[in-house]
Image (cartoon, rainbow, N blue to C red):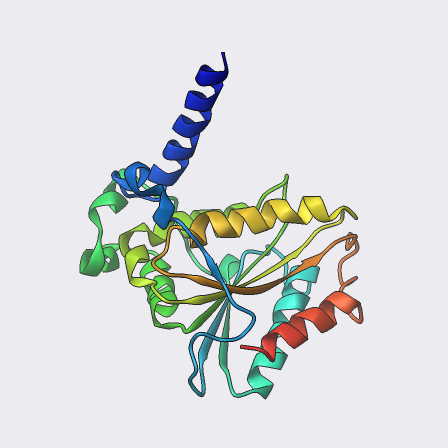
């Protein structure tokens, strides 16, 4: 019985790793790892900071966290751009996308090739989403799926995470953090730099003036 349980767990983990798009990943599970650093691993001036927001509403709590982070990053010389995914056409991942790798990824007719190109160019990527049904939003997940054609080019990036939820339990916010990490762990040599988990923020705009807004601002100053 014990051996059967162990086998089942190992099989599930292997399946999770192969979901990153590498058919051999199950044999190399140890390389699915996210570094962590409180200080930057990309010591350069005027870093390109890309904020990718999966929030469906502007002026909402997640959006306010993004703006606070942007202010902090701009104050220390970052070149900040915020992508509000709801403003773009992002189609679902399809079988055709499996064949669009590298330069061929630009053949897609929606806005994804342009957005992914920004991610490849960025030094710092901020992933932001409210918690919806214990996960990141569909907007962000759909976009993440569509990075398949070029995700191997997103190497040596630094990542920050921003999330907000109505539930006062931090464990609820952790579901969104896991959603971010499920993507980041599949990239080549990523480094996690920090996060904000704004809990108990049910009312639109509740983040304004809160300690979570300050946390996001201070994170931005440490790019």
**Residue 170 place in picture, x, y as percent:** 72, 49
Count of all numbered marks drawn on residues in the image: 0
Q: Quadrant of residue 107?
A: bottom left
**Residue 61 place in picture, x, y as percent:** 70, 61
Q: Is residue 203 placed above or below 115 in the rendered structure?
A: above
Q: Is residue 197 placed above or below 69 in the rendered structure?
A: above
The residue depicted at 37 percent of the width and 33 percent of the height is 14
**Residue 33 place in picture, x, y as percent:** 42, 52
**Residue 136 place in picture, x, y as percent:** 56, 47
User: Image check: 52 left or right of 151?
Assistant: right
The residue depicted at 29 percent of the width and 38 percent of the height is 27
Q: Which residue lies furthest to the front in this view?
A: 2
Q: Quadrant of residue 175?
A: top right
Q: Residue furthest top?
A: 1
Between 88 and 165, the one nearer to me in the picture: 165
The residue depicted at 63 percent of the width and 48 percent of the height is 174
- Residue 220 shows in this picture: yes
- Residue 68 shows in this picture: no
User: Image check: 87 left or right of 100?
Assistant: right
Q: Is residue 14 placed above or below 179 in the rendered structure?
A: above
User: Image check: 33 left or right of 219?
Assistant: left
């Amino acid at each position: 019985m014990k051996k059967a349980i162990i086998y089942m767990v190992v099989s599930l983990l292997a399946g999770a790793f192969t979901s990153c798009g590498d058919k051999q990943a199950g044999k190399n599970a140890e390389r699915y790892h996210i570094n962590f650093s409180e200080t930057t691993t990309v010591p350069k001036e005027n870093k390109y900071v890309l904020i990718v927001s999966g929030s469906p509403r502007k002026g909402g709590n997640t959006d306010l966290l993004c703006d606070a982070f942007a202010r902090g990053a701009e104050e220390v010389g970052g070149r900040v751009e915020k992508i509000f995914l709801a403003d773009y056409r992002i189609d679902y991942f399809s079988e055709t996308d499996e064949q669009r790798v590298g330069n061929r990824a630009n053949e897609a007719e929606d806005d994804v090739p342009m957005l992914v190109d920004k991610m490849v160019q960025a030094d710092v990527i901020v992933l932001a989403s409210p918690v919806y049904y214990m996960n990141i939003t569909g907007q962000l997940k759909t976009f993440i799926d569509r990075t398949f054609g070029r995700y191997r080019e997103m190497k040596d990036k630094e990542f920050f995470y921003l999330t907000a939820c109505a539930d006062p339990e931090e464990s609820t916010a952790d579901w969104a953090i896991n959603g971010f990490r499920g993507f980041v762990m599949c990239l080549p040599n990523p480094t996690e730099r920090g996060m904000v988990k704004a809990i108990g923020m049910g009312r639109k705009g509740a983040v304004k003036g809160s300690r979570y807004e300050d946390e996001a601002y201070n994170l931005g100053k440490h790019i």
